[in-house]
Amino acid sequence: MSDIIASPSTRRLARERGIDIDAVAKRTGRQTIAPEDLNEKSGSPSGYTSYWDVDHSQYGPVTTEPLSRFALVTARNLAAAQALIPAVTHHDRADVSAVEQLRQSWKNDAASQGVKLTALAFHVTALARCLRHFPRFNASLSRDGTSLTLKTYVHIGIAVDTPSGLMVPVIRDADQKGLWQIAAEIIDLATRASARKIGGGEMGGASMTITSLGGIGGTAFTPIVNPPEVAILGITRTQTETVWDGDTPRPVPMVPLDLSYDHRVINGADAARFMSHYCALIADPRNLLI
Amino acid sequence: MDNTIDFLVIGAGPGGYACAFRAADLGRDVTIVDAREALGGVCLNEGCIPSKALLHAAEVIGEARHMSGWGITFGAPKIDLDALRAKKDSIVGHLTGGLGAIAGRRKVKTRQGTARFSGPDTVTIDGKTLGFKQAVIAVGSSPITLPGWPEDPRIWDSTAALELRAIPERLAIVGGGIIGLEMATIYSALGSDVTVIELADGLAAGADPQAVALLRTALEDDGITIHTATQVQTVKAAKTALTLACSGAFTGEIQADAIIQSVGRRANGGQIDAQAAGLTVTAQGVITADTAGQTAQPNIFAIGDVTGNPMLAHRATHQGHIAAEVACGHRAALDTALIPSVAYTNPELAWVGLTEAQAKAEGHTIKTSSFPWAASGRNLASGGGDGLTKLVYDPATNRLLGATIIGRHAGELLSELTLAMEMGATLEDIALTVHAHPTLSETTAFAAERALGTLTDL
């Protein structure tokens, strides 16, 4: 017999609707399943409201399209993360002059290796180093919130915007890989994600996720933590800002960084220290060697 | 005070001893006091258990007689009343002795005597005053005696009837409730010519009338005369016979060699000077307690029959456990309305939850579904007569709201339905649960299937 407790009538209802009761139990984190749990609405932890009970056509012409199964899963997970995690977003900026200089000087080498050395590759490398330094950011809470699992590996998830929706392939053991390899893997994973040719084993299990809008725009945003991870790093477009060296103004390219974190695990001071360390690694990439 | 009792239980019936043992298990130093020598109260000594022993004898006599229809003839039974009484007493003795041993293992002190309150934290037990930290009133109930009747040793209450003094040739039973009908079943089987007189329009008040009608037919088939809607006006005792003058649906005189009064039971709250402890006793002898067993006095609890209806041992037992837990600082309460009722007649009548009439009176929208036992293979193959399994349910949700079973072992069969209701089961839950074939319990699944339109056995 299944470990899940559901009455015979509930089990029959699930079968009639083609719903896997074990999956419902896993999704809801429950061992006892009632008929109400088989309704789609119950997937939303915010419960039922009438906000969406609107006939939009009364206000003008509309068309309706169903969401893909993929989008439904994403929506449910994001809603749960937003509802269940007391998240705070910490904003910072890093000087990317040195990183940009390195990318320029290595451009030909990269081209000859067939690799595009993106700024994102530097961020993945820096984040991997940072996670080694701040182990509580490389952790997951238990379901009941009573214990913290600390990970000795460093895997970095990359949020990829694909035509079919948001996907997060993972670069495994990013702390043990060189810049070139990471750069190559980012391109490979992003390309395959867009083509929906990513295996299930290439997603999940990340230490932290990076979500970068740098190529598109924006000055800041508040990413949603991707559970069971406890933090996510958002990146928007680098802007040249004026920095004063004494009386001398100097134009410096700065990348805006937004760290959303689970406040149950990470305190504000930890987040500030984490980001200071991170910004220092980016500002002087020589630190990445130490 | 030196003589202060940590946890005092007054009354050693099913509520009292359950409470005492639970409290002992929770680490309390428990004293239980009762006027009887043996533990067990009315239930074990002069109620549930002795009546069941005699009902078993009655059942065997009835079964043996019915076997003539199967080509097996035993002849008329020879009844050795002294041996039958001794057997009944030995069963009671075995069980009360067992209780004594259980009490001993738990180091529960037992004390024979009559306890009365002398203050909010003191009792007097046969003249000796003792203090207590917490007390539980579990003094039960007594048979109601009708006023204006003559004093006569041939007029019995249920206690006297179970003493099995004699088998009267003509027995009148005044009161057609569960106890009266059980007595009718016993004495009819033992050979008495039994007449039951009931004031109300129906027997077994509160039970489903459809089921009661089947019971009445079965009892009448066994030779019992039943007068409902009939009042006993006077009882005259003469040397040759007791004469009951009746009016109502039956008007006339009934001659009897003995009468059993079974017109109900009265709570014993008035027998313990509860006022001295600051408690109020109602005109019915009831000491009011909440679902946690708490009375108006924070250190005094009340459980069982003394707290009013329904006066049933299994209710008292649960109340006893809860009172002990609450007294020991736990949060507990009797959080259910489902107290099963069973008449151990032949056939048995058992019900739980709402009956059809009750549900309608309370304004519920309900439907019923029943399965007649005439279509039950197991029932027919084991010589059972007419019977019925009837379910009351909410048609909007198919949730079970009540159940009545009449037929052999109905009391045993009822527990499935009680659990089903406690778990919020629907007709589908019952129908989809595989019941063994051939069994009487199948009739429960069949009744559910019938409501769902999936029954193939009718």
Image: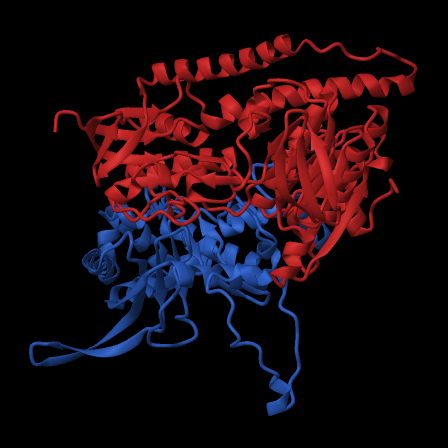
Chain colours: A blue, B red
Taking the spot 63% from the left edge, 60% from the top edge, the residue there is B361
Quadrant location, the N terminus of chain B? top left
Taking the spot 42% from the left edge, 72% from the top edge, the residue there is A215
- What percent of the width, then of the height, locates residue A25? 54, 47
Image: B7 above or below A214: above
Residue at far left of view:
A246
Image label count? 0
- What percent of the width, then of the height, locates residue B172? 68, 32
Q: Is residue B106 visible?
A: yes
Taking the spot 66% from the left edge, 74% from the top edge, the residue there is A65
Quarter location, residue A226: bottom left
Give the left or right position of residue B328, taking residue B202 as reference: left
Image: B202 above or below B99: below
Give the left or right position of residue B343, taking residue B293 as reference: right
In this view, the residue in front, A216 or A131, is A131
Give the left or right position of residue A153, taking residue B457 as reference: left
Image: A149 above or below B90: below
Quadrant location, the C terminus of chain B? top right
- What percent of the width, then of the height, locates residue B450? 80, 47
Give the left or right position of residue A45, taking residue B242 as reference: left
Residue at far right of view:
B71
In this view, the residue in front, A39 or B433, is B433
- What percent of the width, then of the height, locates residue B319? 42, 38
Residue at far front of view:
B239
